[in-house]
Image (cartoon, rainbow, N blue to C red):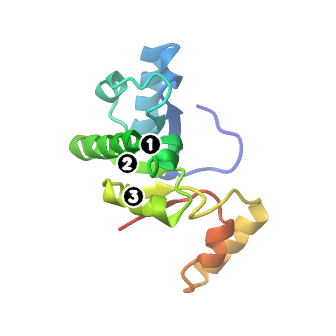
Amino acid sequence: MVCNGPAVTLTRLEIEVTETAPLGDEHRGFQDLLALREMGGRVSLDDFGTGYSSLAHLRTFSFDKIKIDGSFVRDALERSECAAVVRAIADLGKRLGVRIVAEGVETEDQLALVRAEGCREVQGYLYGRPARQKAVRGCFKAWRGGYAGGGSSCRAQGGSANASTK
């Protein structure tokens, strides 16, 4: 694996793969992910529940994190079957010992629902929107400088960061 740009401590590197990514040459794909893990990186399964939704991937490779596709979170307040999928994936993660992230959390009501269904980590516009590098740097500077204001101004600008719901 060759990376152009600044050095990255591999223990801080997390690769997100979609369910369909390893399907081309599945054996080689999983071998590459294992090599990354051996170097200290982490691997997340992104957009889980869409695409091929193969549970076999969970048996073949031990992911560090599973990210529930945002379409289920978005529709879970109006559609009980979507809430059931969120609950089932959260329970699956708990039973497998894998961290689960609910993607696409945009409202306080969605946050309350995914918490109630067992999700402890979320990602979405409620916590941050995509931002230019300059805005993100300003948030990091405020954070490093001991900014104790709860992060609300950075929360609105700082990108789609994961947040714990504990």
Residue 61 vs 155, above or below: the answer is above
Q: Secondary structure at mark 2?
A: strand
Report the mark closest to the observer, 3 or 2.
3
Residue occupied by mark 1: 68
Q: Residue at x 61, y 83 (%)?
A: 145
Tell me which amino acid carries mark 3.
Answer: Leu
Q: Earlier in the sequence, mark 1 or mark 2?
A: 1
Residue labelled with disc 2: 100
- The residue at the point 53 percent across, 14 percent down is 24
> Mark 1 and mark 3: span between their CA atoms?
13 Å
Q: Secondary structure at mark 3?
A: helix
Disc 2 residue type (three-letter) = Ile
Which numbered disc, 1 or 3, marks the residue that appears first in the sequence? 1
Q: Are marks 1 and 2 in contact (CB under 8 Å)?
A: yes
Quarter that holds the C terminus: bottom left
Q: Position of residue 144 (x, y in %)?
A: 59, 78
Q: CA distance from mark 3 to mark 2?
A: 14 Å
Q: Quadrant of residue 4?
A: top right
Residue 120 percent coordinates (x, y): 36, 58
In the displayed structure image, the side of residue 69 where residue 94 appears, left or right: left
Q: Considering depth in this image, is 35 or 63 the residue closer to the camera?
A: 63
Where is the N terminus found, in terms of image quarters?
top right
